[in-house]
Image: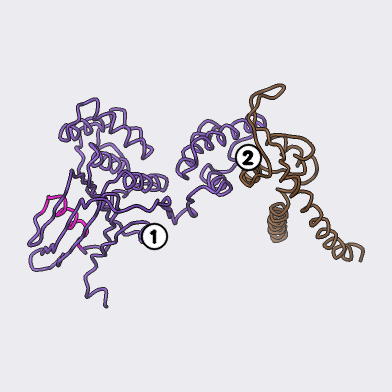
Chain colours: A purple, B brown
Amino acid sequence: MNSDGWLRALAAELHRHGLDPDLARHVVAESATHLRDSGESPLQVFGPPSTYASAVAESVGAPRHTAGVGTARVDAPARAPQTAGPVRLEVRGITKRYRRRPVLAGVDLTVRAGEIAAVVGANGAGKSTFLRICAGLLSPDSGRVRVHGTLGYCPQSGGTADFLHPEEHFVLVGAGRGLNRTQARAAGRAHAAALDWEPAGRTQARHLSGGTRQKLNLVMAALGEPDVLLLDEPYQGFDRGTYLDFWQQLWRWRGDGRAIVVVTHLLNQLDRVDTVLDLTPAREMSA
Amino acid sequence: MLRQLAGCATFFAVDQERRGQWLRGVLDLCVLALLHRRESYGYELAQSLDASGIGPIQGGTLYPVLLRLQRTGLVSAQWREGASGPARKYYRITPAGADTLRRTAVDWDAFARGVETVLREVQTR
């Protein structure tokens, strides 16, 4: 890695660590000066950008830190105590069977503005079914869902159009949410930037990597700033850095007063959310 | 022969690790002491530390120490153009830093003398 590439990576990592932007700029500038003075390779002097960024964040007492590679735990920024916002999503007594197999039995959930609800449960517990019902893509056998405001939904996979470029997706979805072409492109690019993704270019969706396609899905869900975001394991295929960016983005959205429902099986995030809905059937829990 | 080499490598690694541990305990003090002489910037401090025999200190180790010293108010920092060359972040010891340095240097002296006394018996045996 050359110095410029290394310094850019360092800037991105410091951002991920939530370092004050001014301070981060100074750290990068100081590293650049040192590299120019010493003429040595950045990896030799500072090590990998992620490692150095962690050391810097720790020494300045940054608000959050990330654990070692592999665990990818993300600490949520401390929240100012606040009264809960208005109810955005109300789910009451949802029941759903596939043939004769009950998948959801009387599920309730309330999510207010500025809250994140995590939906957990084993494979086949009905997490995606539950989200599709909330999104109105699937009818429950009984029960009701009320959404107060606008809705964005990010499916687990699919959802992109193979032969369209990312920006064409933005325009298409944006049109449905009252954004003109320019606004849609700008909003899409802004959301993409938060995920460290540069969506310009004429790559058709079918040629994007799995992780990038999921970023596209996530950006589409967020276009038009919906009040409620339903996210079905949107981080599949994300590398570790993007995964951290994703959670940062969730907390920003929460801070902006969105109501968020996210399907996750990564239990280490659960103490960072406001509500946990466990769809594991009772008989399995007692087993 | 191979076995010997492997043993050597292990010893070397342990040796490096021990040096690293020693350094962690005193690097901030050494930095404070150097800044007590005169204000300086990161690369120059690294060179001074190397020249004094403490060993090569990489930027990845040095700058976090400087940031911590700055955060705890023991040094202050300022971006400035040097007499020649580009702008650099100059560090200067604060009165609180000088105070800490004085007190801790006394502690260190007592500690190091104790270690030296014990270890000298081994050397002279």
Answer left or right for B44 relative to A148.
right
Residue B112 screen position, x and y as percent? 82, 58
Judging from the image, mark 2 belongs to the subunit labelled A
Q: Quick one: SS at disc 2? A: helix
Residue projecting furthest to the bottom:
A287
Q: On the picture, is A223 further left or further right than A64?
A: left
Q: Quadrant of the C terminus of chain A?
A: bottom left
| Label 1 element class | helix
Give residue A142's position: percent from left, percent from top: 8, 62
Span highlighted in magenta in the image = A126-138
Mark 1 packing: few (<14 Cα in 10 Å), some, or many (20+)?
Answer: few
Label for residue A45? 2
Badge 1 is on which residue? A268
* Quarter occupied by residue A199: top left
Q: Position of residue A6 (x, y in %)?
A: 52, 36
Identity, as a three-letter code, of the amino acid under mark 1: Asn
Residue at 70% of width from left, 48% of height from top?
B28
Report the residue that reaches farthest toward the right.
B124
Asked if residue A42 is positioned above or below residue A119 in the image, the reply reads above
Look at label 2 and name its amino acid. Val
Which quadrant of the structure image shows residue A100? bottom left
